[in-house]
């Protein structure tokens, strides 16, 4: 297999996303789409990256202007119990140049419509973790490469067969769209976005301010450890949907072709029962 080209010290996919141009005046507007169930690190990680970007000698205000947007401004519950009041609704939000979609509850038709419209003029629309499911439901990832949390690879591939799933990718850049793997991967994608706007030195300085020692933003394929599927055993069964270890004594079960399968949650049993071979076929 041919060697991957290199940028700096890291091997990267053959197609390298081009630089992004900041506006001639004013900050880069970044919209964080939220709904009940939003996963905190998925959006607070990128939020901290963007709000800590600085260029020495430049004192004309923040380089990124960050705001939250939701279907209404009614408080939502994120991270299980944190209450967040969105700043804007879909009707009142400024047109963003970057859209960030974290893992959250299933999107409403209004959310899907807003993402499609925002993405039309945005420079970049990015998902983090299973926020990829939300973005894929818009149809905007059709025919493109994307990734998501490794525990959702099978379900994503089944639900969106027209999206090219990149297993083992820390993040994927595909035209005006990008997706990060699970949770902390969003920090690396955000640093990569900073690099595309302002260069590697500014991105490195931002990582240093955050005391972030991760190097995943320099290597899009640094989640290689998750590319290979885990193997269950009798002593250590795995949920066939997400490959999480389960307790046989308490797990929900299904029997398929005379074999018993164990599930980490009822939703995964339901998904498996609807199409077992999608989760077992290689």
Image: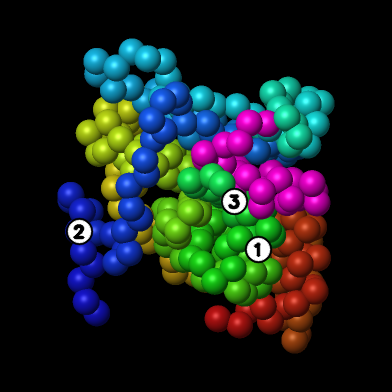
| Quarter of the figure with the N terminus | bottom left
- In depth, the one of 99 and 217 nearer the eye is 99
Residue depth check, mark 2 versus mark 3: number of the one nearer the observer = 3
- Above or below 93: residue 223: below
Disc 3 is placed on an element classified as helix
Residue at 60% from the left image edge and 74% from the top image edge = 162
Q: Which residue is mark 1?
A: 139
Asked whether residue 162 appears in the rendered view, the answer is: yes
Is the residue marked by circle 2 packed among few (<14), some (14-19), or many (20+) residues within 10 Å? few
**The C terminus - image quarter:** bottom right
**Magenta-colored span:** 93-119
Q: Is residue 103 magenta?
A: yes
Q: CA distance from mark 1 to mark 2?
A: 32 Å
Residue 120 image label: 3
Q: Position of residue 194 (x, y in %)?
A: 36, 37
Question: Which quarter of the picture shows residue 239?
Answer: bottom right
For image coordinates 68% across by 69% down, the residue present is 159
Q: Name the foreground residue: 46 vs 54.
A: 54
Residue contact between numbered discs 1 and 2, judged by CB atoms under 8 Å: no
Vertical comparison of 124 with 41: above or below: below
The foreground one among 224 and 31 is: 31
Dot 2 or dot 3: first in sequence order is 2
Question: What is the crowding at mark 3: few (fewer than 14 residues within 10 Å), some, or many (at least 20)?
Answer: some
Among numbered discs 1 and 2, the one appearing first in the sequence: 2
User: Which is nearer the eye, 55 or 207?
Assistant: 55
Contact flag, marks 1 and 3 (Cβ < 8 Å): no
Looking at the picture, how far across and down is residue 17, in whole percent? 35, 55
Label 1's element?
A: loop
Q: CA distance from mark 2 to mark 3?
A: 31 Å
- Residue shown at 81% from the left, 26% from the top: 74
Mark identifier at residue 6: 2
The reply to whether residue 245 is visible in this rendering is no
């Amino acid at each position: 297999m041919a060697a991957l080209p290199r940028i700096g010290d890291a091997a990267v996919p053959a197609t390298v996303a081009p630089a992004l141009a900041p506006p001639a005046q004013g900050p880069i507007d970044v919209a964080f789409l939220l709904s009940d169930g939003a996963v905190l690190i998925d959006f607070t990680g990128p939020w901290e990256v963007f709000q800590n970007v600085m260029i020495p000698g430049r004192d004309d205000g923040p380089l990124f202007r960050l705001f939250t947007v939701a279907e209404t401004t009614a408080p939502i519950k994120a991270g299980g119990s944190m209450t967040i009041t969105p700043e804007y609704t879909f009707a009142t939000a400024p047109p963003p140049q970057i859209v960030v979609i974290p893992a959250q509850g299933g999107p409403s038709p209004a959310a899907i419509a807003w993402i499609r419209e925002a993405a039309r003029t945005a420079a970049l629309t990015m998902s983090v973790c299973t926020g990829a499911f939300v973005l894929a439901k818009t149809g905007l990832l059709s025919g493109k490469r994307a990734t998501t949390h490794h525990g959702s690879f099978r379900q994503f591939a089944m639900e969106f067969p027209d999206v090219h799933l990149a297993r083992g990718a820390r993040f994927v850049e595909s035209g005006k769209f990008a997706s990060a793997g699970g949770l902390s991967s969003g920090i690396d994608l955000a640093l990569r976005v900073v690099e595309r706007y302002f260069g590697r030195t500014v991105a490195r300085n931002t990582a240093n301010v955050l005391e972030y020692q991760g190097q995943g933003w320099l290597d899009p394929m640094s989640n290689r450890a998750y590319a290979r599927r885990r193997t269950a055993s009798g002593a250590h069964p795995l949920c066939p949907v997400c490959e999480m270890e389960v307790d046989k004594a308490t797990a929900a079960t299904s029997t398929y072709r005379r074999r018993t399968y164990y599930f980490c949650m009822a939703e995964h049993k339901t998904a498996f029962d609807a199409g077992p071979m999608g989760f077992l076929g290689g």
